[in-house]
Image (spheres, coloured by chain):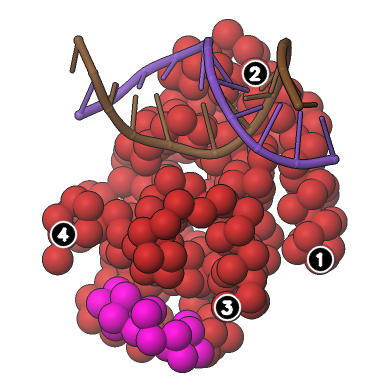
Chain colours: A red, B brown, C purple
Amino acid sequence: MRLAVSTFDLANTITSGQFFRFQKVGEWYYCHERDKCFKVCQQESALFFEGVDESHITRLFGLTKQQEKSIELLKQDPTLIPLINKYKGLRVMQRDPWETLVSFQCSIMSNIPKIRKNMELLAQAFGKEIVVDGQKRHAFPNPGDINDLSKIKACATGFRARYIHAANRMVTDAFFEKLKKKKYEEAHEKLMDLPGVAEKVADCICLFALGKTEAFPVDVWIERVMQELYFNEERVKHDHMREFAKERWGKNAGYAQQYLYHWVRNKQKGID
DNA sequence: CACCAGGCTGTCT
DNA sequence: AGACAGCATGGT
């Protein structure tokens, strides 16, 4: 299957810290979401994919006119212009909420390669086996299925295991569907009732899975880049940065966050 | 090997 | 109520 994409950058979108279950094989990215496995590759303005229908691709990768317009609007902020031009086509994804919750519980005191490992091991330990292109792969387990604390620990999750184990008993897919319909502030507050979920993780779930585009997750990388670009290197509290983002970018704060994060991480890695 | 990561808990105003 | 120090874990 083929889809025309005018402003989209698959590689930067997949590797910008919002998605973890993928594997690059040649030109293809094999991507997982819950029980779905599909492959996707980009050649200029053509996106090729197999294994899911087009609506799945446009939803997951945020390929909407609305997002394109929002990012264009952010160029009214002169500070963001070079970042948006450099990573033109970077999108905020819309992932499965349950899988997003577990991946960001894993993100506590961690890093992207390790989160990817945790998610793969959890799928191997608790998910059903699926075969794609002759390769053995694993679906991600449903809410309720990650129910063995020592097995969760064996997935290199450490002290996060009890958070995942407890949340597994507290949520359902229907719970997240209800949150999608609520306002950002209310969804954010409800998420923080879950173990291993405070301001930052709740904002990641709001932004990457519940469609709350005003959510502005602040981790150490956002703290650093905001200090550099907006606070003249002064130390500022995370709460103040969230307020600042709300004032400055409103409903588009989440898109701003994604460009800031990807830019500062690649700068650190020396990628140009 | 020192260093790097967010949330939870207990303690102090 | 709100601020803050100390803890837990695995990879580089």
Alpha carbon distance from label 1 to label 2 = 29 Å
Q: Which mark is residue A271?
A: 4
Residue toward you, A41 or A171 = A171
Tags 3 and 4 touching, CB below 8 Å: no
Packing grade of label 3 (10 A; few <14, some 14-19, many >=20) is: few
Q: Which mark is residue A162?
A: 2
State whether discs 1 and 4 lie on one chain.
yes
Which chain contains the residue that carries disc 4? A
Image side of residue A28 versus residue B7, left or right = left
Mark with earlier residue (1, 2): 2
Q: Which mark is residue A183?
A: 1
Residue A258 visible at all = no
Alpha carbon distance from label 1 to label 3 = 19 Å
SS for callout 2: helix
Mark with earlier residue (1, 3): 1
Packing grade of label 1 (10 A; few <14, some 14-19, many >=20) is: few
Mark with earlier residue (3, 4): 3
